[in-house]
Amino acid sequence: MDMNWIAIGDISDIPLRGARCVKTPQGKIAVFRTAENEVFAIEDHCPHKGGPLSQGIVHAKSVTCPLHNWVISLETGRALGADEGEVRTIPVLNEDGRLFIALESLMMAAE
C-alpha cells in the first residue's frame, strides 16, 4: 500500500533532543529529534494520564513524560520499565533534512 507522505518541515525546525507538534485530523503528533539526529513521530499524549510527550525530556531513543516521569520508547511507542501502555508511532521520512510523516497509517489506525 502506498503511503501518503505529508511534508511537515525541516529537521532544523526541531532542536536537538527536542520536539515539535503537528496537528492532524486524528490528533496531535509529536515529532522528536534525538541527539544523534534521528527523527521519530508518536502520538503526543502519554498512555498514563495523557501528558504532552512533546514537552518531555528526550534521551537516547526515548522521551520522559513531563507529568509523571513515564519513559516512552520513540521507536516502539511502548512504556519502558515497570510501566505498561503504548502510543501509536507514525512513519517518518527524512529526505536531505526535509521531514515527512505518513498520514496513511493514521487513517488506518483511526478506523
Image (cartoon, rainbow, N blue to C red):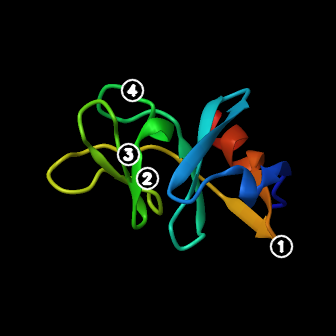
Of the residues tagged 3 and 1, which is closer to the observer? Answer: 1
Q: Contact (CB < 8 A) between labels 3 and 4?
A: no
Q: Amino acid at mark 1?
A: Asp
**Residue at the image point whose x is 47% and y is 63% from the top:** 75
Q: Which residue is mark 4?
A: 50
- Closer to the chain start, of discs 3 and 4, is 4
Q: Amino acid at mark 4?
A: Gly
Q: Tag 4's secondary structure?
A: loop
Left or right: 72, with 19 as reference point: left
On residue 96, which mark appears?
1
- Closer to the chain start, of discs 3 and 2, is 2
The quarter of the picture where the N terminus appears is bottom right
Nearer-the-camera pick, 1 or 43: 43
Q: Tag 2's secondary structure?
A: loop
Q: Amino acid at mark 3?
A: Glu
Position in image of residue 58 (x %, y %): 42, 54
Q: Which residue is mark 3?
A: 86
Q: Is residue 101 above or below residue 69?
A: below
Nearer-the-camera pick, 15 or 24: 15
Q: Which residue is mark 2?
A: 77
Of the residues tagged 3 and 4, which is closer to the observer? Answer: 4
Left or right: 63, with 98 as reference point: left
Nearer-the-camera pick, 88 or 107: 88
Left or right: 106, with 10 as reference point: left
